[in-house]
Each structure stands twice: as C-alpha cells, then as structure tokens.
Image (spheres, rainbow, N blue to C red):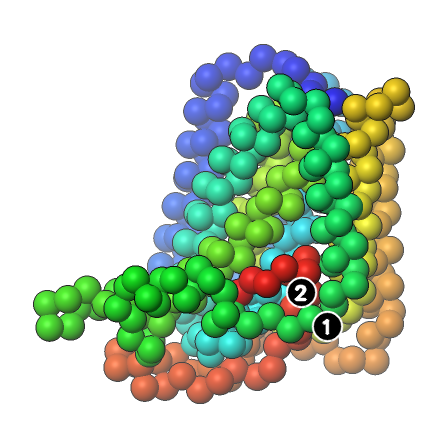
Amino acid sequence: MNDLSFPVPLWVWAAVTVGICVMLAVDLIAHRDNHVIGFKEAAIWSSIWIAIGLGFGLILLAWQGGEVSSTYYAGYLIEKALSIDNVFVFALVFSFFAVPDAYQHKVLFWGVLGALAARLVFIFVGAELLQVFFWTAYLFGAFLIWTGWKMAVSKDEEVHPDRNPVVRLVKKLIPTDPKFHGDKFFIRRNGKRIATLLFVVLVAVEATDLIFAVDSVAAVLAITTNTFLVWTANAFAVLGLRSLYFCLAGLLRRFAYLHYGLAVLLAFAGVKLILSETPVGKLPIPLTLGVIAATITVSIAWSLIATRNQLADTADVPATAGTAPADDRGDETAPAPDQPAARGTHGKESP
C-alpha cells in the first residue's frame, strides 16, 4: 500500500484547515446576494479554484518532493473528474424540483460544506481500515470495480429525487411546505418551524453526495492512504464544485461519453488497490497519473467530437435558464427546461 508516510506537523493541518475555511468564506461573501450566476462568472471562479488546487501541488513539490506532489495531483485529478458526475445529478435535482436559478448557489454552498465533512470522516475511517486490515483493500477494490461497471451500463437509468429514502424520511419527520419561500430553508407559521421546499432540495443534494463521497474517497485511497494527501486532494477538488456546476451545467449534453471514462478510472483504482496487497505491489505514481490524465482527455475529446454538431451555449446565461425566482410566497416555481439525464449515480437509487 502506498502510504507515503511523512510527518505533517499539527500547525500544517491547522493552516490548511484555516485556509479552506477562508476560501469558503470568500466564496460565501462573493455570492451572498441571490444574483443568477452566469457562465462567465462561473468560469472565472472555476479557474481560480483550479489554480489554487494546482498551486497546492507546487507547495507539496517544494516541501516533500516529486513523489508526494505527483501523488497529490493523481488524487486531485481523479476527484475533479468524478465531481463532474456530481454536476449531472445536481442538474437533475434542480430541474426536478424547479429550483429558481438565483437560489441554486445557496444550496450548492451548503452542499459543499456537507461534502467536506462527509469526506473527512470517510477518509480517516477508510485509511485506518486499510492500514489495520489488509483484506479491506480487496473489499474496497471490488467495490470500485463494481461501481465502475454499474456506471458504464446504467447511462439511461432514471433517477427520481422524490423517491430517495432520506428525502422521504425528512418529509415525514419535519413539517414541510411544498413551496419555495425566497432563499429560506425554514419559515415560521403559527409559531411552528416549517421546512421549505428549498430545504428538501438541500437534503436531496446532500444525500446524493454521500454516495459520491464513498466512491471518490475509496478511489483516492487506492492511490495513497496518506490522510493528509487524500484530504487535501478531496478538499481542493470539492471547493470548486459549485462554480463547476454553473460553468458546465449548460454544456452537459456535450459530455455524452464522459461516464465511460469515469467508469474506467473507478475500475482502474479498484485494480490498483487490489494489486497493492499482492506480490505485484503498488503501481508507480507516474503510471497512475498518466492513466488518469489520458482517460479524462480521451473521454472528454470523444464526447466533444461526437457531439460537435450540437450548439454549446456558452453565453452568459444561467445554467438552467427559465426558472423565475420565487417570491416569498413561493408562487412562481415554473419548471426549468429539460436537463440531461443523470448517469444513474453509479447505478444506485439516489436523488
């Protein structure tokens, strides 16, 4: 197993954590109003987050050398690629609930916070299991291979957010108003606290990301069990998820074959994890990095070439143009235009 053990002082963990919190605060302040985020703004912010993620790899290069930096980049790339699949499902959730464009960014912001918390837990638990029980590598590896296969064959599988058990449980436990009330998650009515439809959407997004978190964390643990590298690769990839959504949501139909590439990456990670506990041993990081980069490049290029006759609307328009912001009464919830079908969320029922 490639654990790449090196001392990480407590102050480094603290500095990275504070840095992530600062970036989240900057993102929140920059989008504190309910304006509709267009392609140009989303592209700028996506570029900023990607630059920060790549820049952290250079810091690791100067601090710990090439192998550590390459391992981080391998984890970051596979996380960034898998996050695109999140975008497909988020688009489906927003379209299903007809979420006004102006309120989508708030849901995604809190969704990112939940994603970071879930990944932090999965990282430490998963890394500890792999370190203590060698046979868990076979279980995680088989899980990733199965997940990759399901992703490849479940392209046209429909996903119904309202059928998600977590969403249904929330509706049973918490009094819910079936309308939007501005950007509020809760309102008070007759002295009682009532959840709005926007809160139900947030629950759907969080429940979806729990599924992706298991897959993505397992995929990075196949590259290294160093918790610092796994955490930073996940954190810097997820930080830009909100901007990535608004940047790519209008172009989703162009990524028709990306899910095949993601399926290959998950299966490759599974094989790599299993081989790490056999006489073959861990695969070289340069090989891993090359396979990840080549798979992402080929699948995206294949998709763009196959859909070159489709007009990709890159104008500065909202990702799901057509959803008018709801007023405080929640009267206007006109459905958004059709979004591309989700990739089956790895073959599992999810929102």
Residue lying farthest to the left in this orientation: 191
Residue 254 in percent (x, y) is at: 75, 71
Measure the C-alpha gap from mark 2 to mark 1. 7 Å
Q: Is residue 212 visible?
A: yes
Q: Residue 189: where, in percent of width, then height?
A: 15, 72
Q: Residue visible at 59% across and 31% down?
A: 126
Residue type at mark 2: give it: Gly
Q: Which mark is on residue 344?
A: 2
Q: Is residue 187 left or right of residue 125?
A: left
Asked if disc 2 and disc 1 are in contact, CB closer than 8 Å, the reply is: yes
Three-letter code, disc 1: Asp
**What residue is rendered at 49% in x and 42% in y?**
118
68 w.r.t. 95: above or below = above
Circle 1 residue:
156
Q: Earlier in the sequence, mark 2 or mark 1?
A: 1
The quadrant holding residue 99 is bottom left
Q: SS for tag 2?
A: helix
Picture residue at 32% right of the left edge, 86% below the top: 331
Comparing 25 with 127, the one in front is 127
